[in-house]
Amino acid sequence: MFVSDCLNVNELGHLTIGGLDTVALAERYGTPLYVMDEDQIRRNCRKYKSSIDRFYGGKGIAAYASKAMCCKAMCKIAMEEGMGLDVVSGGELYTAMSVNFPAERIYFHGNNKTVEEIAQALQYGVGRIVVDNLTELELLNSLAASRGKNADIMFRIKPGIDAHTHQFIRTGQIDSKFGLALETGEAMDAVKKALALPHINLKGLHCHIGSQIFDISPFELAAQVMLRFIADIKRETGVELHELNLGGGFGIKYVPDHQPVEYDRYMESVSKVVHAACAELGLEIPYIIIEPGRSVVGDAGVTLYTIGAVKEIPNVRTYVSVDGGMADNPRYILYQSEYHAMVANKTGLQRDMKVTLAGKCCESGDLIGEGMLIQQAKPGDILAVLATGAYNYSMASNYNRLPKPAVVMVKDGDSRVVIRRESYDELLQNDLL
């Protein structure tokens, strides 16, 4: 029934997260409401960190991909758990620095960083700027020179691998807005140019093949391709790069049928490929970086809604409408993403009502799911959508002038607000007449 270890049902038949009653949380904080289990997040962080220690002898780091869910509390948790941080914008970087995240553990990504963002990264002294293209490389060299600095970089490489996920979340194939292609020689040309630039220190390579991947083999193949390219660089330039960022994209269980690979299995399998390929190619084992995001926070979150209208269209479908929707979870409308839902105050009962979950936005496509089985629902019930810790709050909008929901963190039997619910006044605060 549940897709995460942090969920359960109590003696009242209510859904719990981290041992706390979700119905009571909805009553206390209102709905819509994001709830996240801090202990689950920390357990996930520790799985990755221990895997780096075990399979690479500690020669590497797991960098939390903050785009999955970025706020001060999440950056602080990642910092305390010894994680690095993957940021993709000036806003994410600013959030990290607001909690004094160690800049040397930050990896700054993005396919079109602005002048202001690059200057911000240089000012803070981020550990690595992951350069996406030649335009950025030249701009970075110029900005670093004007500030009397040298920039430590990695190149984002397209390894030419199709991860067999939704077309909008595949990023490793040649037809992608991200990175430099191997097939065309573009990547090698960029490497040679970087090695000649006076204010650029090329430290390593990065790749990311996609998101919500359940197979190990694409990650193994990506590691092989990247290490062969490192060997090619060494042969053509005499320079051996000593850092390899293999990205993220590890799938999670959104619905009970999903069977994601255990993170330890992934790490072990890829490490065997890395060790074997390095031995074959005559390379030193590089410092390995991975960038889990969804798999750190996704299963640690639920979203709670209050059910409003229940509308049955005979012989067609039954709509169950909630007080949120695409403004707080756009993933169904974007990717047709699957979710598991239940009536939180009736979790102990059978799920025998087939419904389409509808949001309140003025869009026919504002749905959270179709053909979903939930308990018998009526107005005023609390609906829980599971595994919403990643890419829900971070992708939320104010469409229809809806205030963004609060985010509550639960830990050790207690709860606290880590992001306040927006007020109507806050919606207007940047409006001018």
Image (cartoon, rainbow, N blue to C red):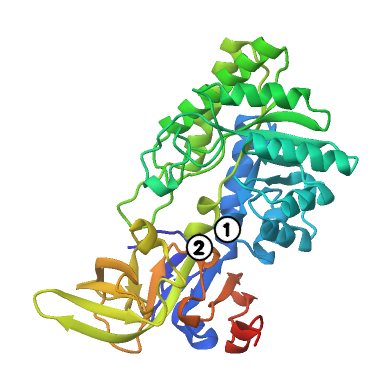
Position of residue 354 in the picture relative to residue 170 (left or right): left
| Amino acid found under the numbered disc labelled 1 | Ile
- Note whether residue 240 is visible: yes
Residue 390 in the image: above or below residue 157: below
Query: What residue is at 59 percent from the left and 61 percent from the top?
Result: 39
The kind of secondary structure element at disc 2 is: loop
The residue at which mark 2 appears reads as 389
Q: Which quarter of the figure is the C terminus placed in?
A: bottom right
Residue 315's quadrant in the figure? Answer: bottom left
Q: Which residue is mark 1?
A: 41
Q: Residue furthest right?
A: 148
- Residue 133 picture location, percent across and down: 62, 36
Q: Position of residue 358 (x, y in %)?
A: 31, 75
**Mark 2, other Cα within 10 Å: few <14 / some 14–19 / many ≥20:** many
- Disc 1 to disc 2, how far (Cα)? 10 Å
**Residue at position x 37%, y 56% in the image:** 335
Considering the numbered disc 1 on the image, is that residue within a helix, a strand or a loop?
Answer: helix
Who is closer to the viewer here, 192 or 336? Answer: 192
Horizontal and vertical percent position of residue 220 = 47, 28
